[in-house]
Image (tube, rainbow, N blue to C red):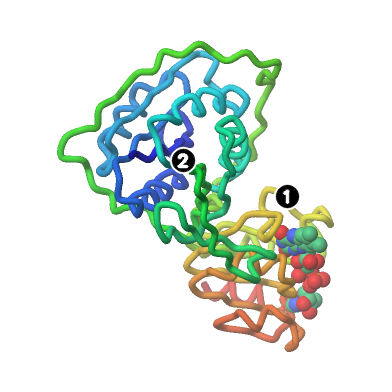
Amino acid sequence: MKTLIIAEHNHHALKADTLVTLGAAQQLGQPIDVFIAGHDMAQLSQDTATIAGIDRVLSWDHEALAMPFSEILAPVIANLRSQYSHILLASSSFGKDLAPRIAALCGVNAVSDVIDIISANQYKRPIYAGNAIATVQNNAACQVVTIRTSAFSAPSHETAASPAHIQALSIELPDTSVRFVEQTLSESSRPELNSAEIIVSGGRAVGSDANFSLIYDLADKLGAAVGASRAAVDAGYIANDLQVGQTGKVVAPSLYIAIGISGAIQHLAGMKDSKVIVAINNDPEAPIFSVADYGLVADLFETLPAMTARL
Ligand SMILES: Cc1cc2nc3c(=O)[nH]c(=O)nc-3n(C[C@H](O)[C@H](O)[C@H](O)COP(=O)(O)OP(=O)(O)OC[C@H]3O[C@@H](n4cnc5c(N)ncnc54)[C@H](O)[C@@H]3O)c2cc1C
């Protein structure tokens, strides 16, 4: 059988999450097709076809897909299920929205947030905010799976010896009462939280949105993304799309610097797999120190300006 990956893209390039999903899909050891829905994406389809490890690119190009959304995509993808034993999506907002709809239309369970593929129908996934890892077996004929991208790697950037076949899908738009109205994107010159190599995160102790400039200054010196605890988000210091944790983003950068963050389990669930964790907190008993590789017991308002000045 074959695996189908549902691509996320910005109409010019695949998102990093989709490339990591490709890395995960390769562990299944079967041919991989990639489904791309969008508009004016001939170049994107061609570029995708040159990525090594892809058998076919299914390209659904339609002007109504300039902003593809789940209500349109789910029935179309579910109709392809007879060709595939596995449908894989990244465990991103897009994938988390789409996967359950596809699974419901296929009459199967979705397996979400997979961190390890043991076999064609057995997976590991975190439960209880990451405090336990469940091994689950799914006996459905078509497995709908979302991949926690912090647990897998993208394949090395190899170009296929010969490009994959691009199959243009000519499909009528499913009937739906849902329509796209507008998208408001937060713009930032900093790296994206999901794919950043370094993240500097601030917590409640930062104290105000104005004080968050201390976090931004350090992040900019390091070329890092900025993250935050939920307490900082709830207090209005920073936008909620930058929240790290159980109900925010799950990240695993090479370096995570937690500043004025206590280390509640819900925060740890989103960052404890980071390769190196640095914590700065004025309480030596703060739980964040139990996962930190390097800890500094210090006042952030003294430490951060000094650190940033030294970089
Ligand atoms: C269902 C649910 C889901 C949740 N999801 C998330 C989530 O996704 N992400 C998340 O982060 N939280 C989440 N939470 C909230 C979580 O439980 C904590 O309340 C939150 O993480 C605390 O944020 P904090 O560490 O910034 O604040 P606090 O717990 O108040 O910690 C502040 C820390 O700063 C230190 N500090 C104070 N002053 C200074 C200073 N001057 N210098 C240095 N350090 C200082 C203190 O010692 C303390 O350790 C969730 C909670 C629930 C119930």
Badge 1 marks a residue whose secondary structure is helix
**Residue 302 vs residue 82, the one in the foreground:** 82
Residue 95, quarter of picture: top right
Q: Residues within 10 Å of mark 1 (few under 14, many from 20)?
A: some
Marks 2 and 1, the one that precedes in the sequence:
2
Q: Residues within 10 Å of mark 2 (few under 14, many from 20)?
A: some
Dot 2 corresponds to which residue?
141
The reply to whether residue 256 is visible in this rendering is: yes
Residue 211 against residue 36 in the figure, above or below:
below
Badge 2 marks a residue whose secondary structure is loop
Q: Is residue 173 left or right of residue 265?
A: left
Residue 230 at what x, y percent from top left?
A: 76, 59
Residue 218, quarter of picture: bottom right
Q: Is residue 181 left or right of residue 121?
A: right
Residue found at the very far right of the displayed protein: 235
User: Who's the residue at 54% across and 53% down the image?
Assistant: 194
Image quadrant, ligand 1: bottom right
Residue 87 at what x, y percent from top left?
A: 46, 39
**Residue 109 vs residue 57, the one in the foreground:** 109
User: Who's the residue at 58% across and 77% down the image?
Assistant: 278
The reply to whether residue 212 is visible in this rendering is: no
Residue 209 against residue 268 in the figure, above or below:
above
Dot 1 corresponds to which residue?
240
Residue 137 at what x, y percent from top left?
A: 51, 56
Mark 2: is the Cβ under 8 angstroms from ligand 1? no
User: Who's the residue at 49% across and 58% down the image?
Assistant: 123
Position of the N terminus by quadrant: top left
Q: CA distance from mark 2 to mark 1?
A: 38 Å
Q: Amino acid at mark 1?
A: Asn
Q: Nearer the viewer, mark 2 or mark 1?
A: 2
